[in-house]
Image: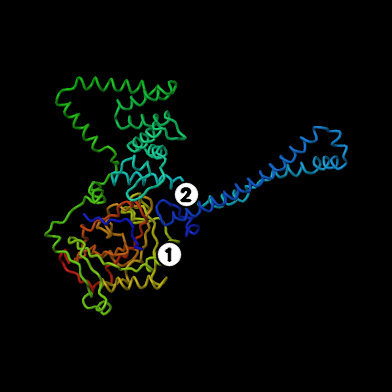
Amino acid sequence: MELRSVWCVVMTCLFHTSCADKDFFTSIGQMTDLLYTEKDLVTSLKDYIRAEEGKLEQVKKWAESLDLLSATASQDPEGFLGHPVNAFKLMKRLNTEWGELESLVLKDVSDGFISNLTIQRQYFPSDDDQVGAAKALMRLQDTYRLDTNSISTGELPGKRSFKPDCFELGKIAYSDADYYHTELWMEQALKQLDEGEQSTVDSVTILDYLSYSIYQQGELERALDYTKRLLKLDSSHQRANGNLKYFEYQLAKQQKAEAEEAPNDKAKREREKREASDKKGIPADYLPERRKYEQLCRGEGIKMTPRRQSRLFCRYSDNNGHPLYLLGPVKQEDEWDRPRIVRYHEFLSDSEIQKVKELAKPRLRRATVHDPQTGKLTTAHYRVSKSAWLAAYEDPVVDKINQRIEDITGLNVKTAEELQVANYGVGGQYEPHFDFGRKDEPDAFKELGTGNRIATWLIYGTAVFWYNLFASGEGDYSTRHAACPVLVGNKWVSNKWIHERGQEFRRRCTLKESD
């Protein structure tokens, strides 16, 4: 089993022990614990159902026996009670047994289930988790150009799941003023209702959200059409009646202005309309390079020319005659030329992978980034994962991995950061970034006292290695990279960031910005 499932490098508590750091949606590894929690609750619920059924079965038997008895007694009440045993049993039933039946009916057999539910509830995901997971679905939808219908029917490449709640996704987008996704998901919710699917929400509610979200995107005519459709279903809808008048007024005003405008103004307006259409769904904080990033995630990225490709090789490397690799060389592959990225195959064994995950899982916490303004660590929406740090002294496997990295790279890892293990969540990603501290971040690694990050060793079962700094110490800006949103699967990675200090005689400095 490999440490990876879905990944892309782009260049241009245990459940209860982690309850203090929820953010479940940021780690699939920790979310698996929620499945076991839910399974336990279902078992407890079934126990409660069986207890209720057992109680009702006792009441049912009692009622059936009394029904038969009263049917016999009512035929000749005096004759029936003339028998002393029957008279005694009547006294006993009314004095004792009916009281016992009352106690049975009043007995609350839900205590065990309620108690278990109360205990487990403190570990449940929060509203933030639900919103985070919903936004992750929309991120996947945008990055991989997935149509709403495919997602709503539970179909993703290579996987099939239960259907999502389209209305709930639309509502979450609406609460975030994301009217583009509100429109997509409300339209899908309406389509499913029109096709006869059962729902807890009606067409009027969906149309209310839909018409307003379309209006917010500047499409008056469509907003008006949906408002009219709503009023056909509920002519007394107060907000829709108000919107109808407003939309009609605004549309008439717009049409009048268009009729009076000069030809040049009309051409300009049509051009602006096309530009607005092209930008539809693009967030305000959209990175200039995001389109290229998403293309790379979809496999539509930069392709090497045959000439460049011909200069890349696979080889068995003994790492310049290193004693450990003379008889067992490492499998080395040139992954990229500028910057030079080298892949090392079969770097970790399956047992080492499992041990690393076992050590990291109880300690996973929301991954952080360096805030360039404050120099402090903080969480960010563009990095959705959890991470843990493993020191060499904690386990022989970690120590062995560190030593292996030093043997292969020839760099001193004594001043490197501890081994970071990351597990990505729903749609987990890390948008384009640099690993090294740039000139406008002079305090990025000041607290470590070991200089800048000279190189990165990144493990996905296989491992890739590159230098972040030129031999001159200047940052290599072509090492900007990213982790694409995880579409399906459970992605684990490990990072080893090697610092400048200790490399003085292992990678000598030059004044050239090259190796």
Q: Can see residue 133? A: yes
Residue found 25% across the figure and 58% down from its top: 438
Callout 2 crowding tier (Cα within 10 Å): few <14, some 14–19, many ≥20 = some
Callout 1 crowding tier (Cα within 10 Å): few <14, some 14–19, many ≥20 = few
The residue nearer to you, when weighing 425 against 218, is 425
Rendered image coloring scheme: rainbow
Marks 1 and 2, how far apart at CA: 22 Å
Read off the residue under disc 1: 358
Residue found 35% across the figure and 45% down from its top: 155
The residue nearer to you, when weighing 155 against 249, is 155
Q: Can see residue 105? A: no
**Furthest residue toward bottom:** 323
> Is 376 situated above or below 271?
below
Read off the residue under disc 2: 125
Q: Amino acid at mark 2?
A: Pro
Give the quarter of the figure containing the N terminus. Answer: bottom left
Q: Amino acid at mark 1?
A: Glu
**Furthest residue toward left:** 307
Q: Position of residue 208 (x, y in %)?
A: 40, 29
Residue found 86% across the figure and 33% down from its top: 78
Q: Position of residue 293 (x, y in %)?
A: 25, 50
